[in-house]
Amino acid sequence: MTENHGTYTDFEGLRERAVALRREGHSLRQIADALQVRSKGMLQRLVKGEPAPEWTRRPKAKDDLRERARELRRKGWTYNEIQAELKCSKSSISLWVRDLPKPEPRYTPEEQLALMNAGLHRLRAAQDEQRTEIKRVARHEIGDLTDRELFLVGVALYWAEGQKSKPYARRERVVFVNSDPSVIKTYLAWLDLLGVDPQQVRFRLLIHETADVDEAHRYWADLVRADVAVFGKPTLKRHNPRTVRKNTMDDYHGCLVVSVTQSAKLYLRIEGWWAGIAAHAGSRLG
């Protein structure tokens, strides 16, 4: 045998050795190395008619997967559906079924839109349920508030939302404005904790001129348990035709202005309380 020139002078002898190795369970690579045969075509001729050893055969799992993919494609399944069912790549699916005709759409555009909207509704419902549960757990984490905790909450609340005095505009008066009913109730509970006389508390509405002012008065009066008659004159926001308002729903009631008469000293105490909170919080940062 002289393979350097691509010729084999003793083909039959070489074949006899190759067949013997094949029957002993050798792979093509092992036979090629043993006989120093580098031609793939020659190697195939040498072992022609001899079955490959069982251990060298490709597992049938891939073949079964391929047949299953083709079966599903014939039933009209999409690539995405086949991939989800068989847990294999789209590239493999495409290779296996590309000779099969593309299935007709299973749904009309209207049906597809309806299915998409239904899926979106289920997703949003699940997300809403998750958000509700997170808030429920967080609410129970708070537990009961001590007077000191409510006191600190009220100070921070006022300093975030209340009127503050400035060097260029001294306004040492306690005035609080907010549209959130829960915030208003928390603020009033804080004033009560501080011992503020209810007779000193005044209410006034700050609302858009196109809103239902009378209904808003009734809403806030009921919330703070006061007579509408004690409310001050409302401040109406003028409508800018170039602005698109988003707060036009039935639950829009404007903002409630809560002021405390003769409150200059209280305001100064609030400012001092906040300075103390800020100093201690700042010290944690080093």
Image (spheres, rainbow, N blue to C red):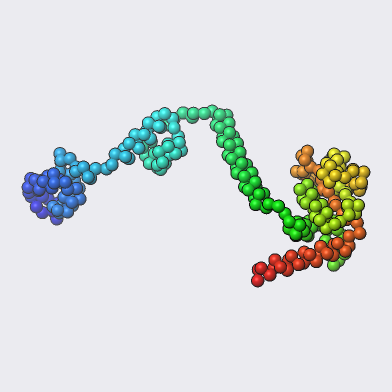
User: What residue do we see at 83% from left, 54% from top?
Assistant: 192
Apparent side of residue 21 relative to residue 252 in the rendered image (left or right) = left
- The percent coordinates of residue 234 (x first, y second) are 89, 47
- The percent coordinates of residue 153 (x first, y second) are 75, 57
Work out whether residue 215 or residue 136 is closer to the camera in this orientation and state it: 136
- The percent coordinates of residue 22 (x first, y second) are 15, 45
User: What residue do we see at 80% from left, 55% from top?
Assistant: 190
Identify the image quadrant of the C terminus: bottom right
- The percent coordinates of residue 281 (x first, y second) are 70, 66
User: What residue do we see at 82% from left, 52% from top?
Assistant: 188
Q: Quadrant of residue 150?
A: bottom right
**Location of residue 117 with respect to 21 vertically, above or below:** above
Q: Give the number of callouts.
A: 0
Q: Quadrant of residue 251?
A: top right
Apparent side of residue 116 relative to residue 103 in the rendered image (left or right) = right
Q: Is residue 281 visible?
A: yes
Q: Is residue 239 visible?
A: no
User: What residue do we see at 17% from left, 54% from top?
Assistant: 33
Work out whether residue 17 or residue 212 is closer to the camera in this orientation and state it: 212
Work out whether residue 217 or residue 134 is closer to the camera in this orientation and state it: 134
Work out whether residue 82 or residue 46 is closer to the camera in this orientation and state it: 82
